[in-house]
């Protein structure tokens, strides 16, 4: 299950990130994953203060978003990092590493996310492709939109044929480690929000009782 969220960033935040990207140093993306031969992109060098600043800006926007919180149940968030794909670059099919080494200790990657920064019309190719069985779902979002998916999902970035694809990526450790449990809680919360007032007060209360106690039971 994946979730596409619009307007995670506002116009001012998008502008700040784009402006910062013009002055940042980008390095070979394989520096963060040297053993993955499928990875051909550039990433902002994270030691730069401006890279850290825009990462924190994006991270704050992600964590304040209700749709994201209700889908991912985030406990910890890796600081979002800018990535750039130029013509001929891509990231072949892969599943994300189970743990990331952060300054604060290892983070378990339960949910992965791509935050779109550049205009989709400014580059050809470069779609985020999520593989679900024999199906392939392609995403090329508007600036400020975000796609979230389980980190276990096979996915790729299609080759960029012209222009420049600018985006950010991040990983979340969820308070609900099990993917199926997250999906069930998300669905129950959606049903409660959409139909809660169409049932009796007693049944709405019982539904909230189930949701709250499943959350307690499944929290890692």
Image (cartoon, grey):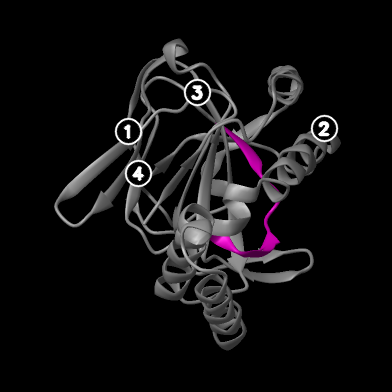
Nearest the eye: 158 or 39: 158
Residue ID at (55%, 60%): 72
Magenta extent: 72-83
Q: Earlier in the sequence, mark 2 or mark 1?
A: 2
Separation of residues labelled 4 and 1 (CA atoms): 6 Å
Q: Which residue is mark 1?
A: 158
Q: Which mark is residue 86?
A: none
| Label 4 with label 1: CB-CB less than 8 Å | yes
Query: Which element type, helix, strand or loop, lies under badge 1?
Result: loop
Q: Residue at x 42, y 70 (%)?
A: 184
Q: CA distance from mark 2 to mark 3?
A: 23 Å
Quick one: which residue is furthest to the bottom in this view?
217
- Which residue is farthest front? 200
Decide: is 36 above or below 88. below
- Give the secondary structure at mark 2: helix
Disc with the residue nearer the chain's start (2 vs 3): 2
Q: Please give the label number shown on residue 156.
A: 4
Q: CA distance from mark 2 to mark 1?
A: 28 Å
- Please state the horizontal and vertical placement of residue 143, each as a whole percent of the image: 56, 23
* Label 3 vs 4, first from the N-terminus: 3
Looking at the image, residue 173 sits to the left or right of residue 124; the answer is right
Gap in Å between the C-alphas at discs 3 and 4?
Answer: 18 Å
The nearer-to-camera label among 2 and 3 is 3
Apparent side of residue 104 relative to residue 207 in the rendered image (left or right)? right
Q: Which marked residue is nearer to the observer: mark 3 or mark 4?
A: 3
Looking at the image, do the residues carrying marks 3 and 1 touch, with CB atoms under 8 Å apart?
no
Query: Which label was assigned to residue 142?
Result: 3
Whole-percent x and y of residue 63? 71, 50
Q: Against 165, is 149 above or below?
A: below
Circles 2 and 3: CB distance less than 8 Å? no
Residues under numbered marks 3 and 4 in contact, where contact means CB atoms less than 8 Å apart: no
Residue 180 x, y percent position in the rendering: 39, 73
């Amino acid at each position: 299950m994946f979730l596409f969220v619009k307007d995670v960033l506002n116009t001012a935040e998008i502008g700040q990130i784009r402006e910062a990207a013009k002055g940042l140093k980008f390095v070979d993306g394989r520096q963060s994953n040297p053993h993955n031969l499928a990875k051909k992109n550039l990433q902002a060098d994270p030691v730069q203060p401006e890279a850290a600043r825009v990462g924190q800006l994006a991270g704050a926007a992600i964590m304040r978003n209700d749709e994201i919180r209700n889908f991912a149940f985030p406990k910890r968030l890796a600081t979002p990092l800018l990535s750039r794909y130029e013509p001929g670059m891509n990231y072949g099919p892969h599943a994300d590493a189970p743990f990331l080494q952060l300054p604060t200790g290892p983070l378990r990657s339960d949910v992965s996310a791509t935050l779109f920064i550049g205009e989709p019309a400014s580059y050809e190719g470069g779609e985020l492709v999520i593989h679900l069985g024999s199906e392939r779902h392609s995403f090329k979002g508007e600036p400020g939109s975000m796609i979230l998916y389980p980190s276990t999902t096979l996915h790729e970035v299609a080759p960029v044929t012209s222009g420049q694809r600018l985006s950010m990526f991040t990983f979340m450790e969820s308070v609900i480690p099990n993917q199926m449990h997250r999906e069930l809680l998300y669905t129950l919360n959606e049903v409660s929000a959409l139909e809660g007032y169409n049932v009796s007060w007693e049944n709405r209360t019982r539904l909230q009782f189930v949701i709250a106690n499943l959350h307690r039971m499944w929290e890692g």
